[in-house]
Amino acid sequence: MIVVCNTSPLTNLAAIGRFELLHEIFDKLHIAEGVWAELNFGGTEWAGRAQVAEADWIERHHVKNELLVHSLRRDLDRGEAETIALALELQADVVLLDEMEGRNTAQRMGLRVVGVVGLLLEAKNRGLLSSVRPWLERLQTEAGFYLSKRLFRYALGLAKEELGESE
């Protein structure tokens, strides 16, 4: 299975201490150089940067179709644009993206998209997590990940977990 990953799943899973789920779910990930650049932006080592640097199961690529990247950059950031272009070049089975505009663009281009919430659900489905609720909550509080109440409830429903009083 060919899987191309954008920055957000890397940083968000690292921020909540579950970066290893990516390797447990997928044998290998492919990232564009634009994603690597985002992990090093402003001279800061963002969450996930060290894990990506050490992971022999993550392969970095220079995107060949610069014209497509340039076109996609009208609406997307560099990482998203290069991720989508790389996914098309590699004929990826899955592209890991969270940002809505990037997800919509990838889907319009025929790519199958999974986000960090979908990754947590898959991890539970495979028995790698006993519950998704605490990880969804940590995404919000520790990673600053925006998760609407509707999506939170939907994810809990898919995971067959109880809704709380306030949900």
Image: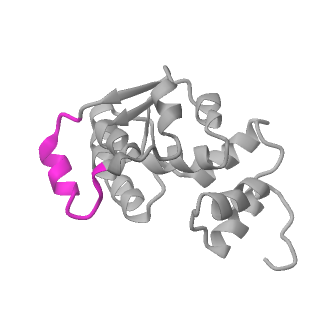
Task: Write the start and end of the magenta stretch as one range.
Answer: 63-78
Residue 112 visible in the shown view: no
* Residue 68 lies within the magenta run: yes
Which residue is drawn at the image coordinates 42% and 45% (left, top)? 6
Give the vertical position of 73 relative to 148 (above or below): above
Q: Quadrant of residue 53?
A: top left
- Residue 103 is left or right of residue 162, and the answer is left
Residue pushed farthest front?
43
Percent position of residue 64, x then y: 18, 34
- Residue 166 is left or right of residue 138, and the answer is right
Percent position of residue 28, x then y: 50, 25
Which residue is drawn at the image coordinates 78% and 42% (left, top)? 129
Give the vertical position of 64 relative to 153 (above or below): above
Front-most of 119 and 61?
A: 61
Question: The C terminus appears in which quarter of the rendering?
Answer: bottom right
Q: Quadrant of residue 108?
A: bottom left
